[in-house]
Image (cartoon, grey):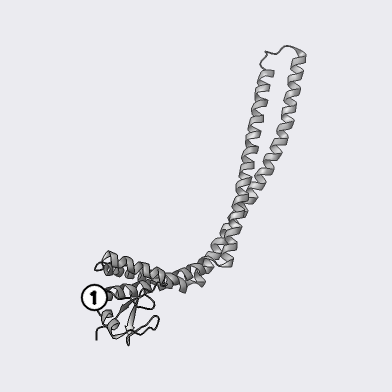
């Protein structure tokens, strides 16, 4: 089998694979970048951020209340321990406890407010998640045909990639490197057919000598005009 034929078969596979990848990207964009879907994702992200913030505020409020209760407990323990005998000291200690309890009331009010906010924003976050799920379900139903096409394309892509691995085996590494470089330079089209003694990519007509060289079974021949590798079917 000629080198040019091996490369031409590889080119056909690569062209087909490229078309599949292009279509898969289009489907992915359509499935993932729906305006309603993006808005639902944005709303969920904002709700989760706000909920997380209120959770932090609630934790701080709960810690402040616990710390204040500990101060009161320690002060009351001292008051009733009998270790303090001086009436003035006892009065001051009682006043301190009363002040601590008044501040505890304020802290508990803040804790309650934080709990309400946390619960409210938690519900908002759950609602945003439900909305996102509903949008995804609706899109899934609407785009069922796209999903079916996507699955079929993925199957075809797997098959073609397997065929490509086999097509690479008879091609020498230096020639394969040249082919890969040409694909990058020539917009993914490195090998084209020679028809009626002309390059089917650029239309350049070959001389009889060039035409003979292009039909060699052992060497590759590049179009003198566009530089692509030419493949000539055996007549």
User: Looking at the rendering, which quadrant does residue 231 occupy?
Assistant: bottom left
Looking at this rendering, what residue extends furthest in the top direction? 85
Residue 41 % position (x, y): 57, 59
The N terminus - image quarter: bottom left
- Near-viewer residue (43 or 120): 43
Q: Nearer the viewer, residue 22 or 145?
A: 22
Q: Residue at the far bottom: name it.
A: 196
Question: Picture coordinates of residue 213 (x, y %)?
Answer: 26, 79
Residue 160 at x, y = what percent? Answer: 33, 70
Secondary element at image label 1? loop
Quadrant position of residue 229: bottom left
In this picture, is 80 found above or below 233? above
Q: Residue at x 67, y 40 (%)?
A: 111
- Left or right position of 130 against 9: right
- Tell me which corner region of the image, top left, top right, bottom left or bottom right, holds residue 60: top right
- Residue for point 59% across, 52% down: 48
Q: Would residue 133 be visible to someone looking at this image? A: yes
Of 38 and 64, nearer the camera is: 38
Classify mark 1: residues with Cα within 10 Å, few (<14), some (14-19) or many (20+): some
Left or right: 170, with 86 as reference point? left
- For label 1, the residue is 2
Q: Name the residue rendered at 66%, 34% in the picture.
A: 65
Q: In this image, 216 relative to 108: left or right?
A: left
Q: Nearer the viewer, residue 176 or 211?
A: 211
Measured as percent of width and height from the top left, residue 99 is found at 75, 27
How many numbered circles does the render carry?
1
Can you say which quadrant of the picture contains the C terminus?
Answer: bottom left
Q: Is residue 232 visible?
A: no
Question: In the image, is 220 to the left or to the right of 75?
Answer: left
């Amino acid at each position: 089998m000629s080198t040019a034929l091996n490369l031409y078969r590889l080119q056909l596979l690569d062209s087909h694979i490229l078309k599949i990848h292009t279509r898969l990207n289009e489907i992915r964009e359509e499935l993932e970048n729906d305006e309603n879907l993006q808005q639902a994702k944005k709303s969920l992200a904002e709700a989760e951020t706000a909920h997380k913030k209120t959770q932090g505020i609630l934790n701080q409020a709960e810690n402040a209340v616990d710390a204040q209760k500990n101060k009161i407990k320690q002060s009351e323990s001292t008051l009733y321990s009998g270790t303090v005998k001086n009436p003035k000291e006892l009065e001051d200690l009682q006043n301190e406890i009363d002040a601590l309890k008044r501040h505890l009331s304020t802290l508990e009010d803040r804790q309650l407010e934080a709990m309400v906010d946390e619960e409210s924003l938690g519900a908002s976050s759950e609602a945003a998640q439900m909305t996102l799920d509903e949008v995804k379900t609706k899109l899934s139903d609407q785009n069922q045909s796209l999903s079916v096409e996507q699955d079929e394309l993925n199957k075809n892509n797997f098959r073609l990639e397997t065929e490509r691995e086999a097509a690479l085996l008879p091609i020498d590494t230096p020639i394969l490197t040249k082919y890969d470089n040409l694909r990058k330079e020539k917009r993914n089209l490195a090998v084209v057919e020679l028809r009626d003694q002309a390059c089917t990519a650029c239309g350049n007509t070959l001389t009889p000598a060039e035409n003979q060289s292009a039909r060699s079974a052992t060497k590759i021949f590049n179009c003198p005009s566009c530089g692509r590798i030419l493949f000539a079917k055996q007549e």
